[in-house]
């Protein structure tokens, strides 16, 4: 009966790959959340800027309200800058995680390929007596 001598290692590599898959999925969710938060900030800032444009086109101008809106737009701009930094860091973390997953997957595939090759060699080396085959 065929036994792959590196079966324990293959099992460990499968587990490691599964851990990397889950980790990458978690990092992807975090990245997506940061992108969504940044997009909400951009949308809010655009709304404030549109409101400022409408206010400037009106007959009367409430300077206090305009100033408040300008300050709010500026605060949102700063928040967007911070969010962009966070998104960039999350994207880098995602790339690293994907890289680790690729390496783990390649390790599993290499061991599985070796196992298949060893199994084929084992079957070719067995006498053909019509008995049960592995």
Image (cartoon, helix red, strand yellow):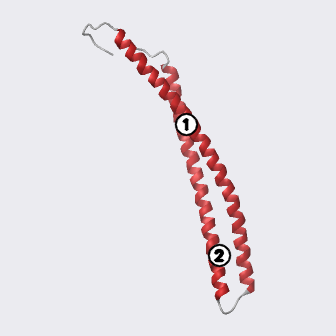
Quarter-of-image position of residue 134: top left
Q: Position of residue 16 (x, y in %)?
A: 55, 31
Q: Which dot marks residue 16?
A: none
SS of the residue under disc 1: helix
Q: Which residue is mark 2?
A: 48
User: Can the viewer see residue 15 in this picture?
Assistant: yes
Q: Which residue is mark 1?
A: 101
Residue at 42% of width from left, 19% of height from top? 117
Q: Position of residue 40 (x, y in %)?
A: 60, 65
Q: Position of residue 43 (x, y in %)?
A: 60, 69
The disc, 1 or 2, on the residue closer to the chain's N-terminal end is: 2
Quarter-of-image position of residue 62: bottom right
Q: Position of residue 75 (x, y in %)?
A: 72, 68
Q: Is residue 26 left or right of residue 123?
A: right
Q: Is residue 75 left or right of residue 10?
A: right
Answer few, some or many: residues within 10 Å of disc 2's Cα (few below 14, many 20 plus, some between 14 and 19).
some
User: Can the viewer see residue 1 in this picture?
Assistant: no
Residue at 34% of width from left, 8% of height from top? 126
């Amino acid at each position: 009966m065929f036994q792959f001598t590196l079966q324990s290692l293959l099992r460990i590599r499968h587990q490691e790959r599964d851990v990397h898959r889950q980790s990458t999925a978690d990092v992807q969710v975090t990245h997506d959340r940061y992108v969504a938060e940044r997009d909400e900030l951009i949308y809010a800032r655009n709304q404030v800027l549109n409101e400022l444009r409408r206010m400037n086109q009106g007959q009367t101008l409430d300077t206090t309200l305009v100033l408040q809106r300008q300050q709010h737009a500026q605060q949102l701009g700063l928040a967007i800058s911070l969010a962009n930094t966070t998104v960039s860091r999350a994207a880098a973390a995602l790339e690293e995680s994907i890289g680790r997953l690729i390496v783990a997957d390649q390790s599993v595939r290499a061991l599985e390929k070796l196992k298949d090759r060893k199994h084929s060699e084992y079957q070719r080396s067995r006498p053909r007596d019509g008995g049960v085959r592995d």
